[in-house]
Amino acid sequence: MKHFTANVTVTLRSSILDVQGKTVEHALHSLHMPALSDVRIGKHIQLTVTAPDADTAREEVDDACKKLLTNPVMEDYSIYLTEVVAAEKA
Amino acid sequence: MKHFTANVTVTLRSSILDVQGKTVEHALHSLHMPALSDVRIGKHIQLTVTAPDADTAREEVDDACKKLLTNPVMEDYSIYLTEVVAAEKA
């Protein structure tokens, strides 16, 4: 069995108003940072997958995203999967 | 002035117990997905930066992270900055 690290980024669909992002944007402008705009806030989920190959690992993560991690009606997600080749502690 | 897109990933420091991640991990196992483990949940923040150059843009985002977006005691963050070369609507 191989080990993979999956980084899942979950973002609100662009057509949906991001209230949290708007609030942060206002706060940034109040802190005299007018150069920052269009703030959108999402989730970042990191997990370890144990699977025989990369395809199975990707499917497993995709399944988890659809069933639990995201709301497919309102959110988009992207999966970035890397294989752990060596993990040592010095 | 140039436009940049910054993707900030905020994660809890590895020494800090991630209660939300543990809960999600238990939920995944209850859904018969034992291959997924070590779940850690963080934030993903996307914003647009207007600045004369990339260095200024990076500093501006770094400043925002330190002052508002992250808790430097408990969280780590990474910034991924890209320059918007063309933005057209079809």
Image (cartoon, coloured by chain):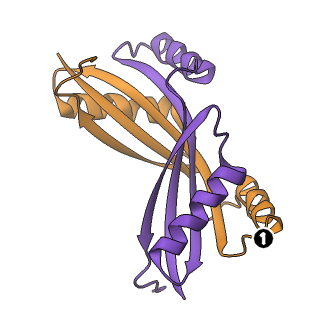
Chain colours: A purple, B orange
Q: Is residue A19 left or right of residue A9?
A: right
Image vertical order of residue B55 relative to residue A51, above or below: above
Residue B14 in view: no
* Residue assigned mark 1: B32
Image vertical order of residue A79 relative to residue B83, above or below: below
Question: Percent x, y for residue B74?
Answer: 61, 50
Residue placed at 18% from the left, 24% from the top? B86
In which quadrant is the C terminus of chain A drawn?
A: bottom left
Q: Is residue A44 left or right of residue B51?
A: right
Graded by Cα atoms within 10 Å as few (under 14), some (14 to 19) or many (20 or more), the crowding at tag 1 reads: few
Residue placed at 78% from the left, 69% from the top? B29
Q: Which of these two is toward me, B79 or A90?
A: B79
Residue placed at 25% from the left, 37% from the top? B82
Residue placed at 48% from the left, 80% from the top? A53
Chain letter of disc 1 in the image: B
Question: Percent x, y for residue A86?
Answer: 41, 85
Residue B87 in which image quadrant: top left
Amino acid type at circle 1 is: His
Residue A57 in view: yes
Question: Percent x, y for residue B44?
Answer: 51, 40
Question: Percent x, y for residue A54?
Answer: 46, 74
Q: Which of these two is toward me, A68 or B2?
A: A68
In which quadrant is the N terminus of chain A drawn?
A: bottom right
Image vertical order of residue B76 relative to residue B87, above or below: below
Image vertical order of residue B11 relative to residue A72, above or below: below
In what element is the residue under mark 1?
loop
Count of numbered labels shown in the rendering: 1
Q: Is residue A9 left or right of residue A32?
A: right
Query: Which residue of the protein is positioned furthest toward the right in this rendering?
Result: B30
Query: Which residue of the protein is positioned furthest toward the front in this rendering?
Result: B90
Q: Is residue B46 left or right of residue A46?
A: left
